[in-house]
Amino acid sequence: MLDVRDDAAIAVSGLHRRFGRVTALDGISFSVGRGEVVGLLGHNGAGKTTTIRVLNGLFAPHEGEVRVLGLDPATDGARIRARSGVLTETPSLDERLTARENLAFFARLYALEPARARTRVAELLERFELTDRARDKVSGFSRGMKQRLALARALLHDPELLFLDEPTAALDPVAARDVHDLIRGFAGEDDRTVMISTHNLVEAQRLCDRVLILRQGQLVAEGTPQELARRLGRSARVEFELDPDQRQRAIDLLATTGHVGQAAGDDVVAADGVSREDLPRLVALLAAQGVALYRVSPAEPTLEDVYFALYGAHEPQPAVDSQDAAEAQP
Amino acid sequence: MNWRSIGGVVRRDLAVVARSRPAVLPIIMLPLIFFVLLPVLTSWAIPAGAAELDELLPLINAMPQSIREQLGDGPIEGIILRYLFEFQFVSLFLIVPLMVAAVIAADSLAGEKERKTIEALLYTPTTDLELYLAKLLGPWLAAIGVATFGYVLFVVAANVTAPAVVTRPIAVNSLWIVTLVWLNPAVAALALGTLVMVSARVRGFMEAYQLGATIVLPVVLLMIAQFSGLLFLDAGLAVVIGAVTWIVALGILRLGYRWFRRERLLLTS
């Protein structure tokens, strides 16, 4: 039986989903609290989009239990979708319609009263700086404009839960920063929850309270970016500031411990892959061998370090997401 | 059932079709050719070829008495013209609701997959049944609307251009009424059912339209049977053909609903 916390916006236990012979989700379990911003990370085909589709009742799970806002997506999909907003990976806008017509159409599907719909559409067009282009057909929009319009559509009905699939993929840095501010602002209002599926690790580190890392349909890591970095801290980089004359000696000493040191300036030697536990030992060794250390700077591992520690930098991308699986079906 | 959502999807689908040249062209051209050009040309051609119309006497003599009585007496060109306008053209004109329904349904079902707009629609609270009904209602209503409007044009064109030998209003009879209220809606539903099944297997508008257009074959057979004198279509037979068409169409549409599930729509788009 799924243990659902009172404050859980999403609770998933042992979720399996297959497409033909391909397993897209392989028994994943996680929960997301109300008001959290959670990142869903993984290569293409890791199961991110399938997860979002299952949570919204578009795909039925084959095994496991799922609750979204306290409801079962398999039986209450429509009620969940009425309370959630989704920014799809492609903008999914009707290019023959104008920006306003696109939003007005979806406002109707989200059951906004006509007067409220008009106000809300105008508000969102203004908020996403599309008012001047409201009467233009979407076919003439840039990718960034389409992305903004799609984001406006996801927010039309003021959802409690927002799913964003690559929200800033098509945006320039300024627009991306605006979207980041918007997501932060959205999450800060009334305990609203955001799940971001992204390849952009900097974005995930900046926005997410917690990340879930999927690999071939399995949840391989879960936690705050800082927690994961500590847990997988073996890839940290440490810089030693020392006397320039002792630089080569320090590099040689580091080599005896299995670490590769390299010059990072006249008086700096940097070593990658130094874990938290290794650091005191290395400092003691260098000091004992007469290397005068003026500064030791361990860099906090980034989410990128964690991601590649889990995935391996050159691992080929598996094809197990629903889209790929559809092709693979007999 | 959320009829407001259904109405929204219907309106959106029709607005989108109205802005697509490949879809709009056949919707405009077919009625113009069938309902205006054809009666005008026929009204001119029949009297012009009056000398050769005697060859059609065996066809007229083979007609059921009920049809023969409706055609009345008078010059042969008047009888032939009346037969064409009031009986023969009915099967020909069935192509219009059929093709209009097929074009719009191809755009609304397969076209939506091709344009990648289906996913956002599937993330709305609209249920599978509501979406399915909306996707059927738009093309169906449009097909009936175009066919009915076309019929009005046809009646005007036929009566304005009919030669003097036709002494009373033509193309207004019980067969046409049955066709408008019973046969046209059934034929449009059959086209929709076919397009639902075709759209499940293709990814684009043109492919769906071309495959779906094969549904015109039964109507062509009906036309040939009429022209050759194998079958004389009257109101009674139209009621029967309509009933059979409805049964087949509803059966296909019911099967189509089994296919029309969010999961399947996503996996085939």
Image: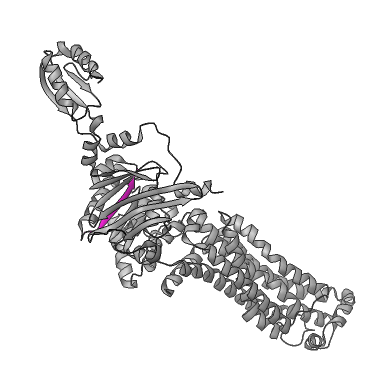
Whether residue A146 sits left or right of residue B262 in the image: it is left
Residue A141 seen anywhere in this rendered image of the structure: no
Outermost residue toward the front in this view: A1
Foreground of the two, B259 or A256: A256
Magenta segment boundaries in residue numbering: A191-198
Q: Is residue B14 left or right of residue B82?
A: left
Is residue A273 positioned above or below B204 on the image?
A: above
The quarter of the image holding the N terminus of chain A is bottom left
Compared to residue B72, the image places residue A1 above or below, namely above
Q: Position of residue B128 (x, y in %)?
A: 46, 66
Image coordinates for residue B3, horizontal then vertical, percent: 43, 74
Quarter-wise, where is residue A281 in the image? top left
Magenta stretch holds residue A192: yes
Q: Residue at x 26, y 19 (%)?
A: A260
Q: Does residue A52 appear anywhere in the picture?
A: yes
Along the line of sight, the residue nearer the viewer: B97 or A80: A80
Q: In the displayed structure, would residue A228 be above or below residue A100?
A: above
Question: Relative to B175, does residue A37 appear above or below in the rendering?
Answer: above
Viewer-nearest residue: A207 or A143: A207
Which percent across, then down, holds residue A77? 38, 64
Residue B170 image position (x, y, % from top left): 72, 83
Q: Magenta stretch: residue B59 in it?
A: no
Residue in the picture at 21% in, 15% down: A251
Question: For this view, does A158 lie left or right of residue A285?
Answer: right
* Majority SS type along the magenta span: strand
Please identify the residue farthest to the top as the structure is shown.
A245
